[in-house]
Amino acid sequence: SSGMLLLPLIIEPCSWRKYLPLRNIQLLPSDRQTVTGDYAGREHEIFSAVAERISSWLTAGGKTPPAPLVYGEPLAVDVSRLPVSSVSGGDLIGRKKELQTLDEAWESYDTGVVVFVGEGGTGKSALVERWLQQMSGERFRGARRVYGWSFYSQGCGTTATSADQFLSVALDEWFGEDSTRYRSSWEKGNRLVRLLRTEPALLILDGLEPLQSALHYQRGQITDPGLARLVFELARDNPGLLVITTREAVFGLSDSGRCRGAQEERLEEMSFEDGAALLVAEGVSAPTTELRAASMELENHALALRLLAGFLKDTHGGALASLRATSALPKPPDGPAQRVMAAFAGRLGAGPELGILGLLGLFDRPCEEAAIVVSSARRKWTRAAR
């Protein structure tokens, strides 16, 4: 009622979320922590915060002033296996909407999994990296554990077919369990689900695509049973949040009735204002109107704009002389990024450089020099056989 100060204090774990009015009230220690569990031995910190809140309320004449949430330090944080992005100037262009999506998903009790889908170069890893930096500045907002893993470095093509290493490390190092007790990948994934459901944890899985099927009829399906169990079960019930970055949408996740806690976001397109800012950050100089026009010409596609910046730096010293520089690009049916790659191919002409570009097109991620040599030898052998 009017003039009343209500300060819910969570002493022990309980089902307070079932009482809907409390979900819109700031709780102490926070909506994901308890006094006995997270502040054992230092309860005075929370009770002091309660006293300060009451004092501030009385000082303000009975009007509740805004006050920051109080978070304790997480039990464990390990994000060392996540990639470090190479965002130009250390700045993340655009993506305010996506950052807000992550903030809302973390605070929501209905969202357990967020999947960001986009081609390489669209800034998926940079987006998650920036959000983790923000979360770190606020003690990860009540997360008890924060873990990150990248499947990106496991190899090229179809060589990465198992999540066993990830599942074993997660159990052995992160939760102190003996993963050898579990005979199959499914059992490991199931055990990890149970552990993650015991407390609010933040799990980041970067570059999931090596463990997704490339077959047309099941494109994007997670091929490892343990990892599939983990993702789908956390989408059904997760007190924390699982964030996935991938080049392929996860087959069956967003359209599954039992996984209403899953949310998928595509990253290819940005606003034309952000597209213009991205070109500037990548070293392109031109009037703002022309930068925006170039962004719209390439459908505000993040990867295409980064490729265009490289093309312009190589051909025009980074200057976008006029809109003709983009409107005159070839228009293959595949999309805006392919337009810029076609321009690169036209500039290189017939020769070894174009051959190397073609060989790089065989890989969907960075590859070793030996793989290029083998691919080149096979290509020569095929031509000779013809």
Image: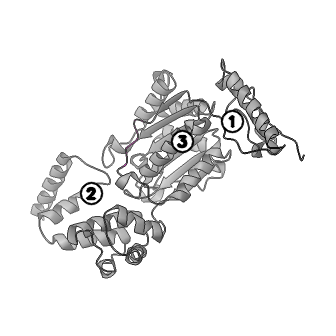
Q: What residue is shown at x 11% (from left), y 67% (from top)?
A: 351
Looking at the rendered image, the disc whose residue lies closer to the viewer, 1 or 2, is 1
Residues at marks 3 and 2, CA–CA distance in whole angstroms:
37 Å
Mark number, residue 224: none
Quarter of the image where one finds residue 357: bottom left
Q: Amino acid at mark 3?
A: Met
Tell me the number on the disc at residue 30.
Answer: 1
Q: Earlier in the sequence, mark 3 or mark 1?
A: 1
Q: Amino acid at mark 1?
A: Ser
386 lies above or below 322: above
- State the SS at label 2: loop
Q: Quadrant of residue 180?
A: top left
**Which disc number belongs to residue 135?**
3
Q: Mark 1–mark 2 contact, CB under 8 Å?
A: no
Q: Amino acid at mark 2?
A: Leu
Distance Cα–Cα, label 3 vs label 1: 15 Å
